[in-house]
Image (spheres, rainbow, N blue to C red):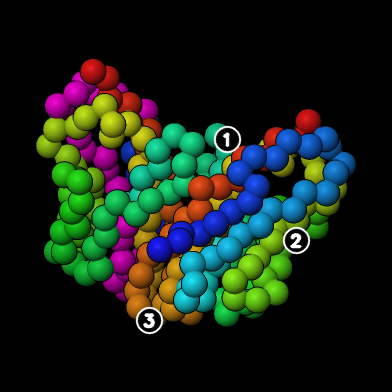
Amino acid sequence: GNSVTQMEGPVTLSEEAFLTINCTYTATGYPSLFWYVQYPGEGLQLLLKATKADDKGSNKGFEATYRKETTSFHLEKGSVQVSDSAVYFCALQAKGGATNKLIFGTGTLLAVQP
Amino acid sequence: DAGVIQSPRHEVTEMGQEVTLRCKPISGHNSLFWYRQTMMRGLELLIYFNNNVPIDDSGMPEDRFSAKMPNASFSTLKIQPSEPRDSAVYFCASSPPSTQNQPQHFGDGTRLSIL
């Protein structure tokens, strides 16, 4: 079945450090891939998405590239800020289904220190 | 545009009481999802609806949990009787028709504490 595996946290970085959060997936066909972010006390917000192989999603300085050959969708940011501290979820959505059901990873807590 | 609206934002009640959580999806969205989030188990999909019809309730923990969607603009998740282990943050999410390949939009959640 479909599944998402992402690196366990917490990830603790200093401000302006480079961020990578790894995400790999297992799916039949070619799913759409997403990164959601959850700030403390809030719901999940869509951060970026990619719908086909080699697509690059980007938003707020974050990027992720849909790599079919490695079934990965790693999240990167060149210089993190304290305000980026949050939980990040990788997710996939199988295409052709009746609904937009998402399969989520377990989430990775990012803590950025000043 | 109004997002997904959940109420109440916080609920504290004693075990054995009935709890009702409410959700208003984004207008035009035809899929609705209920999730539960805890530190121990992470984010769990409880049930989801398509065009007001429950599609998959395999994530509902037990018979004490029930969910309804009487119309396209309203859904409830009910716990009766409630237990301390039901304490969690419950999220509702909605999405447009799947042909649009659009992501889910989440509400801010209901933080439930059962004493």
Q: Hey, which residue is sitting farthest top in the picture?
A: A114
Tell which subunit mark 2 falls on: B
Give the mark nearer the N terminus: 2 vs 3: 2
Q: Which residue is mark 2?
A: B66
* Residue A40 place in picture, x, y as percent: 44, 34
- Whether label 1 touches label 2, CB < 8 Å: no
Answer yes or no: are tags 2 and 3 on the same subunit: yes
Give SS at disc 1.
loop
* Residue B36 place in picture, x, y as percent: 59, 48
**Marks 2/3: CA–CA distance:** 28 Å
Is B35 inside the magenta-drawn segment?
no
Q: Which residue is mark 1?
A: B40
Tell which subunit mark 1 falls on: B
Question: Is A2 placed above or below A105 here?
Answer: below
Give SS at disc 3.
helix
Q: Residue at x 31, y 66 (%)?
A: A32
Q: Nearer the viewer, residue A63 or B111?
A: B111
Give the mark nearer the N terminus: 1 vs 3: 1
Q: Nearer the viewer, residue B15 or B55?
A: B15
| Residue type (three-letter) at the residue carrying disc 3 | Thr
- The magenta segment: A10-34
Q: Residue at x 59, y 54 (%)?
A: B6
